[in-house]
Image (cartoon, helix red, strand yellow):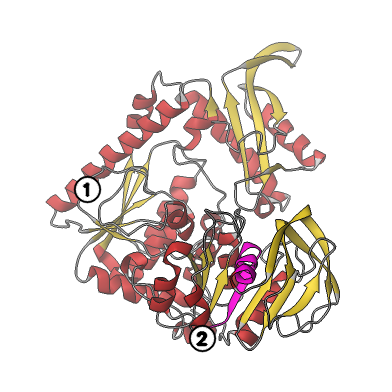
Amino acid sequence: MSSAAASASSTAPVRARGGDEALASEEVVVVDYGGQYSQLIARRVRECGVFSELIPHGAALAEVRRRRPRGIILSGGPASVYADQAPPLERELLELGVPVLGICYGMQLLVHSLGGRVEQAAVGEFGRSALAVRAPGRLLAGLPSEQTCWMSHRDTVFEPPPGFLTLASSDASPVAALESQERGIYGIQFHPEVAHTPFGQAILERFLGEICGCARSWSPASIIDEQVARIAEQVGEGRVICGLSGGVDSSVAALLVHRAVGDRLTCVFVDHGLMRRDEGEQVKRAFRDAFSVPLVAVDAQERFLSRLQGVIDPEAKRKAIGEEFIRVFEEQAARLAAGGQRARYLVQGTLYSDVIESGGGSGSARIKSHHNVGGLPERLDLELVEPLRMLFKDEVRAVGEQLGLPERLVWRQPFPGPGLAIRIVGGEATRERLEILREADHILQEEIRAAGLYHELWQSFCVLPDIRAVGVQGDERTYGYVIAIRAVTSDDAMTADWARLPYDLLERVASRMLSEIRAVGRVVLDITSKPPGTIEWE
């Protein structure tokens, strides 16, 4: 760890097991009113060097009192503040002596609760808007008087509450930003957390630094020491087992645990034969050689191929692969126990996005079937160790870099748990088809990396449909498989656009596939965005 990271670690937040004990220091909470950008607000605050989490609006007051944050942000949301079922504002939040910033619905809640006027406008405001700063006040100080911002609302603030200063307006919003310095309450109608608001990050930085007085010393790397100490406290002298998938989440989690408990961690890597070329060897080299982590590598390719024989439906493939993984993992855990290495704890690479999407989670000590290593039994008596449950994906990658994880593992594009089996569409995942798809995918990845485009793409991969097409090679008729190239750009995988790969790159890829893989007779490009399509074909 760098000296800067080490010094920051003394003030970085420490989460107790399951994330259910209060933070000790610098934090700004985001009260979630159901806005589509709520999670992004927390991410942007973290990017400013301040730890942040979402808390549900129904538990906001109790949580804020428990956490004692440096500031509160009220998120946007789909409701109208004057509707009967609208999520309310707990007025006591404004009397706790910490600054409050309302964004979109959050601002309208403040205005509505404090005596201002919020009404439905004749025309809604969605997308880019021109913002005129009339009186910068404290929140918008130092920013241009004319700027653009991103709006997404139909209700509008027409009059601020008594004692508030109007800071800015737009064509459809007479009051687009306001503040009361005396009360420490601030509001903006637009969304500072999205990239379409050029000065949005500057506004958040001003709120966090100038108004909340945050030291802004938090970073993903700064929590390594704290997480290691927390893991050591939780595990004590117990033994830990980790189902290592080869993805960045389980890899980073395993390295953090290994720092805490050393050889009392055993990683189990199940090679099901459905990974991309050389990925299994990369994982084994990294953990055995580079990090000296105890690793049990299980060659289970024949078992998985046998289970997939005759299986065509993608959901049936997923189920067969998940069940077989369970059986292999159970066998290895039993062998370790028979050798006097019975594990009491299981490492799981749960991320903060997983926690949010599951409604907050309670850190249960029982493993559920949807966990990250492939689907373990409902009642496996292992207590969870989840060192990443407070981190977003990009933060996990930063921690992985800090820990020295190889670049190919840190920045590996998302890869489905069932592996290449579900990229063989409409047919059985046979050894022959897996090898064809594996070689095609290797060519695609090699050329994309050589072109310097790998990190610009959210995902890039090949699909092998169970169809063949007529071709001509060497003056002879061929009847080969079709390879579909799929490459997309995305920020969060919720929406995705097909990537405009250069024609010369596509030409090289297709030429190599047709020349180097005898069974391939045609190469096509998928130009479907999400929606209406999905990123994976199945």
Q: Where does the image place residue 156, in percent across and percent down from the top left?
A: 72, 61
Residue 191 visible to the viewer: no
At x 60%, y 61%, the residue is: 40
Indicate left or right for 275 with 153 as reference. Answer: left
Range covered by the magenta-colored residues: 97-112
Q: Is residue 23 magenta?
A: no
Instruction: Answer left or right for 3 relative to 463.
Output: left
Q: Which mark is residue 169?
A: none
Determine which quarter of the picture holds residue 385. Answer: bottom left
* Looking at the image, residue 520 lies above or below residue 269: above
Tell me the CA gap for discs 2 and 1: 46 Å
- The residue shown at (38%, 65%) is 387
* Pick the front one: 344 or 201: 201
**Type of amino acid under label 2:** Gly
Judging depth in this view, the residue of 462 and 316 nearest the camera is: 316
- Can I make out residue 36 in this image? yes
Looking at the rendered structure, the secondary structure element under dot 1 is loop
Q: Position of residue 125 (x, y in %)?
A: 77, 55
| Label whose residue precedes the other's in the sequence (2 or 1) | 2
Left or right placement of residue 463 versus residue 191 in this view: left
Q: Is residue 419 above or below residue 61?
A: above
Label 1 is placed on what type of residue? Leu
- Residue linked to disc 1: 380
Left or right: 54, with 132 as reference point: left
Residue situated furthest top in the rendering: 477
**Element marked by disc 2:** loop
Q: Are marks 2 and 1 in contact (CB under 8 Å)?
A: no
Q: Position of residue 521 (x, y in %)?
A: 67, 21
Residue 97 numbered mark, or none: 2
How packed is label 1: few (under 14 Cα within 10 Å), some, or many (20 or more)? few
Please tell me whether residue 430 is drawn above or below residue 257 in the rendered image: above
